[in-house]
Image (cartoon, rainbow, N blue to C red):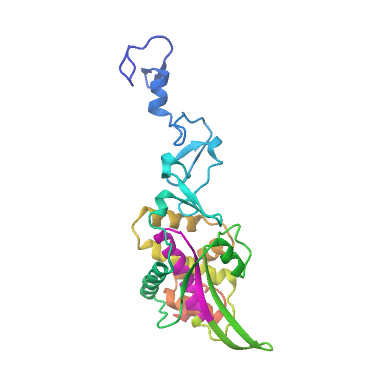
């Protein structure tokens, strides 16, 4: 009898599978996947990333790309780079990394146009975009839940008071993590531009509940990603859908439900007026 893998005679021990003989080594090669890192056959317990790369648990000390989440190693990404601020970007993502403020500004203009097509027009509003490292982002952040939701972008504005009365408000800039690949950068920028839209359309300066505003900003990311027919966009949509964070994930789910009742521009104006997501009945009478 002959092995169904190599077609050579079977002598000694063999594996019978679906009635056919296999050399043990040929069977493993055909049916047991190898680790993408060390090429050894995987055991019953192994790790697998979104992209289908399977690797031994013993390799879990390898870094993963901050942008695409692939394991950063030669066989998968051709290596990568760890930046001084702790950002890790694989070599698949570094090819389109945004490294200059000029390129950041160009992409910002592009995403303002995209935001307008989604129904949120910033007109001539000032929204300068600057690159920043992780430390700068954290120093300027108003929130502290970044362990669960990594901080990659930030909209910054200032408010002046006379007593408790607001007498002045100014949008200062948008900071975005440097070295992100362009499509990831675009996703972060459109999120922060939505924060800018809320700033400019909220002259009284009454802050929205965090879950409401962040939920809609993530929804805008998602709506843009849906227009992109790429594996990268589908990956980022899956990340949004699976997020369990109560602010970003929970807010997105509520915003997505509300979007079934109102178009995006009406939904944003509703939450500005009411400080909450609409129910189906409330949306029916609002629109």
Residue 287 in magenta stretch: no
- The residue sitting at 68% across, 87% down in the picture is 164
The quarter of the image holding the N terminus is: top left
Q: Judge whether residue 125 can be spotted in this image.
A: yes
Residue 191 in magenta stretch: yes
- The residue sitting at 58% across, 76% down in the picture is 208
Where's residue 5, x and y in %? 33, 21
Residue 136 vs residue 110, the one in the foreground:
136
Where's residue 176, x and y in %? 49, 66
Residue farthest right in this picture: 163
Where's residue 225, x and y in %? 40, 62
Residue farthest top in this picture: 12
Name above or below for residue 15 compared with residue 239. Answer: above
Residue 281 vs residue 213, the one in the foreground:
213
Residue 206 vs residue 157, the one in the foreground:
157
- The residue sitting at 61% across, 67% down in the picture is 139
Q: Which residues are magenta?
A: 171-199
Residue 112 vs residue 10, the one in the foreground:
112
Q: Quadrant of residue 212?
A: bottom right
Q: Judge whether residue 257 can be spotted in this image.
A: no
The quarter of the image holding the C terminus is: bottom left
């Amino acid at each position: 009898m002959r092995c169904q893998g190599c077609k050579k005679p079977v002598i000694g021990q063999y594996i019978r599978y679906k009635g056919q003989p296999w050399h043990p080594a040929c069977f493993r090669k055909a049916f047991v996947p190898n680790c993408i890192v060390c090429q050894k056959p995987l055991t019953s317990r192994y790790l697998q990333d979104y992209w289908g790369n399977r690797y031994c648990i013993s390799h879990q000390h390898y870094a993963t790309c901050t942008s695409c989440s692939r394991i950063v190693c030669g066989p998968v990404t051709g290596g990568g780079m760890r930046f001084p601020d702790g950002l890790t970007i694989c070599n698949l993502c570094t090819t389109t990394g945004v490294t200059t403020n000029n390129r950041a500004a160009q992409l910002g203009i592009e995403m303002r146009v995209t935001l307008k097509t989604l129904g949120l027009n910033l007109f001539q509003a000032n929204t300068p975009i600057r690159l920043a490292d992780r430390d700068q982002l954290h120093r300027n952040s108003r929130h502290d839940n970044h362990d669960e939701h990594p901080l990659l972008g930030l909209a910054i504005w200032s408010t002046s008071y006379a007593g408790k009365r607001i007498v002045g408000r100014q949008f200062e800039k948008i900071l975005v993590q440097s070295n992100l690949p362009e499509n990831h950068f675009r996703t972060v920028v459109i999120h922060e531009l939505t924060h800018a839209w809320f700033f400019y359309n909220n002259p009284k300066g009454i802050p929205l509940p965090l879950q409401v505003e962040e939920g809609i900003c993530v929804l805008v990311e998602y709506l843009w990603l849906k227009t992109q027919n790429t594996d990268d966009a589908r990956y980022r949509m899956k990340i949004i859908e699976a997020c369990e964070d109560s602010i970003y994930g929970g807010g997105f789910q509520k915003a997505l439900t509300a979007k079934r009742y109102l178009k995006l521009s009406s939904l944003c104006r509703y939450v500005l007026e009411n400080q909450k997501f609409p129910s189906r009945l409330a949306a029916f009478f609002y629109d």
